[in-house]
Image: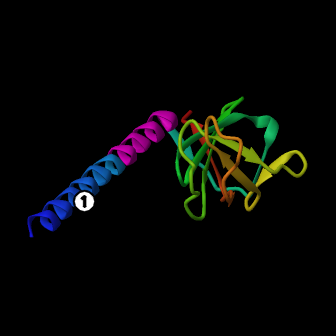
Amino acid sequence: MRVPIIAAMLALAGCAASSEMQASQRAEARNDLATALGDRVPGAPRDCISISDSDGPQIIDDRTILYKPVGRTLWRNDLGSSCPGLRPYTTLIVEVHGSQLCRNDRFRVLDPGSSIPGAYCMFGRFTPYEKAK
């Protein structure tokens, strides 16, 4: 009788540790987003951005990607749904058609040290954030 109870207690402890880790990751993502956006103010979302206007992506969490500005505008992309494996320090393999990156363009995630990309994910709308004048 004691073995099943101990096993159940260990399983619950693992769930608690996992939920604490997820809460910590969410808090870190919120902090990273707040730091990156700073005092910038959002504008009207757009369907496409020019690839040349960005210095590459910063992955915040499994639903949020920032494209750092070359100029004044930082672009925030909120995916329509979470993207499995998308987290900071992963690489995006983006299918680009032309000189713009657009809503519903597909990308895949590549984990560090891996050579097999994950499932396809799609970009959402791009919201510009500019420094207040």
Q: Is residue 15 above or below residue 116?
A: below
**Residue at (67, 33) in percent of width and height:** 69
Helix, strand or loop at label 1? It is: helix
Rendered residue at 54%/39% (across/down): 88
Q: Quadrant of the N terminus?
A: bottom left
Q: Nearer the viewer, residue 124 or 74?
A: 124
Residue for badge 1: 11
Q: How far across and down, in percent of the image, does residue 44 sit?
A: 64, 55
Residue 94, horizontal then vertical, whole percent: 76, 48
Residue 64 position in % (x across, y down)? 55, 50
**In the image, is 80 to the left or to the right of 11?**
right
Q: The C terminus is located in which quarter?
A: top right
Residue shown at the point (30%, 54%) measured from the top left: 19
43 on left or right of 10: right
Q: How is the image coloured?
A: rainbow
Q: Which is nearer the eye, 40 or 80?
A: 80
Range of residues picked out in magenta: 24-39
- What amino acid is found at the position of numbered circle 1 in the picture? Ala
Instruction: Name the residue at the right extreme.
Output: 98
Numbered-mark total: 1
Using the image as rendered, state which of residue 86 and residue 5 is in the foreground.
5
The reply to whether the magenta stretch includes residue 44 is no
Magenta stretch holds residue 27: yes
